[in-house]
Amino acid sequence: MRSSSLITMTSALPVALAALVAVGSLVAWLGRLGHGRAVLTACLRAAVQLGAVSLLITWVIGYSAATAGFILLMYGVAALTAGRRITPSRSAWWAAVPVAAGTAPVLALLAATGVVAMDAIVVIPIAGILLGGCMTATSLAGRRAVDELKQRRGEVEAALALGLPPRDAALEICRPAANQALMPALDQTRTVGLVTLPGAFVGMLLGGASPIQAGIVQLVVLVALLAAEAIAILVTTDMVARGYFA
């Protein structure tokens, strides 16, 4: 009999989850990776947050205003998380700009062309995927760009001495490192179907869609993510070069 779920709900599920959390935390601690406690707290937060979101979405999908509010909440958390990875200062909130710059036009294009229906049950997960991708891309690009400028400050000053404007001098140094933030999305897209079967594909199959339909949905998601993250990285790098995250 075909299962309708990727995970089988058994009494052993809590035990398996607890064991996996313990293994991840212990390995990080014993291996001195510096994130032993962070692994534990991240898993606990994920459990609480997913439980709350599961209940909240049941109510949200019935109201347009609630749907918009929920997406704005996701956006705020994504922007704050990315900003804190780039800088601990109050300028962290500037991360809201690249996250929005990557997500908004891509989501608008999908909606305007009718590729994505405006039903809450569709818009919320698509917006969440795009926001999550832009959050990661912004934090990686921003962190790498900031670190590169700090470590190679002398080269920036040399470029300034040669007559380059401050923004151009900074970009010459930090752009190559920041651009590496697009590699995870590129690798995921290049190897889809060969290394991994992403969540959208598997979810569609389990929901009863044909493999062709599932493949089309996953392709749209991957291409949209690449476009959104590319925009976010471009805007982030430019903002770092202009000193917004100083």
Image (cartoon, grey):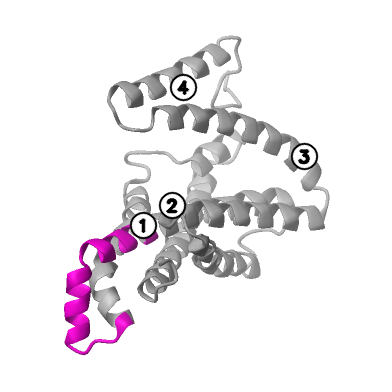
* Marks 3, 2: nearer the viewer: 2
What residue is at 19 percent from the left and 81 percent from the top? Answer: 159
Query: What is the crowding at mark 3: few (fewer than 14 residues within 10 Å), some, or many (at least 20)?
Result: few
Sequence-wise, the earlier of marks 1 and 4 is 4
Q: List the residue tagged with mark 3.
A: 58
For label 1, count other residues whose C-alpha is less than 10 Å away and answer few (under 14), some (14-19) or many (20+). Answer: many
The mark closer to the camera, 4 or 3, is 4
Chief SS of the magenta region: helix
Q: Is residue 129 left or right of residue 72?
A: left
Circles 1 and 2: CB distance less than 8 Å?
Answer: yes
Q: Quadrant of the N terminus?
A: top right
Q: Amino acid under label 1?
A: Arg
Point 52% across, 66% down: residue: 94
Query: Could you give the CA–CA distance between mark 4 and mark 2, rounded to whole angstroms?
Result: 23 Å
At mark 3, the secondary structure is: helix
- Is residue 219 visible from the viewing direction of this image? no
Q: Residue 85 carries which label?
A: 2
